[in-house]
Image: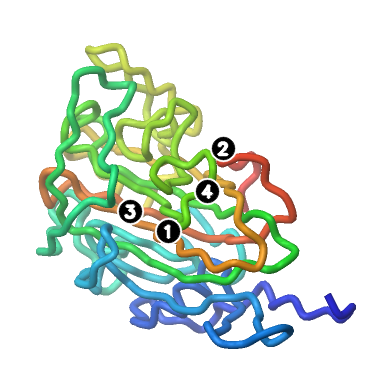
Amino acid sequence: CDGSVDNAAVACDDAIALDDPDPMRAARAIGLCAQTTDAGVGKDKRWGVISAEYVRADGSLGMAAASHGIMPAFGPAKAQQGANLLVLSTGSARTPGQPGYVDAETANMGTTGGAPLGFPKPSSLCPGVSPSTSVHDPAALQVKVRVPTNAHGFGFRFNVYSYEFPMWVCSAYADVFVALVSPAPPGSQNGNVSFDSAGNTLGANSQLLLACNPLTTDAGASFPCPLGPSLLTGTGYDQTTQGGPHAATGWLESLSSAPPGEVITIRFAVWDAGDAIMNMSALIDRFEWRPSVSTVSTQPVVNPI
């Protein structure tokens, strides 16, 4: 507001190792470059990341270290901003050939935990199916951020991969991705700002699985898969076991309002439902502040990088 350009540089995530343990570098990988503190008044009360943690889906400590990774691309899916993107996985956050890779069918990280309050939720695509409340291999990045005073919202891009498609669609074992914001913005679902147009959370039972081979279940749930399976190449989700190749959403963008100048917490989280295998991975990148956001929404990115 002083007339000087002081926006943080967009590219702040180069030279970060695949297995870097510092969650502040993970925040940089998704595009949150500016850092600040809880202290400060007036002009010194700047916007930016106050803290970052790797946690489980319910916000408690204890996430498996191999369930996060920072990389320039996940198969054909490239970083959408800067040099790198963040991968969170209920298995190993790696692709075949990278150190520590374990295939997404069998990887078991040996952790458990609770689901966030209000989750899991049933899917409208799968009437009569109650999602399992048993949480395995939860993985999350939680950031505490002060919103710029001239921003009224934010957006970020993400891409969710599901090994449960197609064999375990409309089962109780559908793994879950959520992006939880606190305080909960208007239009969110218990704070979650990432869900499809029918209100379903992202996973094998969502309308936003777009990169796959077309499927119609016996119960009538339809997945036209307009992107085809090419995005899965080289990710481990292209394996043909369990009815594969499997599925991904392709790049999506979620938008949410945010109170200018206030502190909010965002938790990007995945977890295995009911068992510790048939994993899910979520790519997160291109976090950007917006001058105005009218409502919470999630839409496919028309021309991703």
| Residue 299: image tag | 2
Residue 56, image x, y percentages: 25, 63
Q: Is residue 85 left or right of residue 128?
A: right
Residue at 53% x, 75% y: name it: 28
Name the residue furthest front: 41
Which residue is tagged 3?
281
Q: Amino acid at mark 4?
A: Pro
Earlier sequence position, callout 1 versus callout 4: 1
Between label 2 and label 4, give the one nearer the viewer. Answer: 4
Secondary structure state at the residue bearing disc 3: strand
Query: Which quarter of the figure has residue 81?
Result: bottom right
User: Is 204 rendered above or below residue 146?
Assistant: above
Residue at 31% x, 27% y: name it: 123
Give the Cα separation between the discs numbered 3 and 2: 19 Å
In depth, the one of 109 and 179 nearer the eye is 179
Label 2: few (<14), some (14–19) or many (≥20) C-alpha neighbours in 10 Å: some
Secondary structure state at the residue bearing disc 4: loop
Residue at 72% x, 50% y: name it: 292
Secondary structure state at the residue bearing disc 1: strand
- Which quadrant would the N terminus be assigned to in this image? bottom right
Earlier sequence position, callout 3 versus callout 1: 1
Give the Cα separation between the discs numbered 3 and 1: 10 Å
Earlier sequence position, callout 2 versus callout 4: 4
| Residue 74: image tag | 1
Secondary structure state at the residue bearing disc 2: strand
| Residue 185: image tag | 4
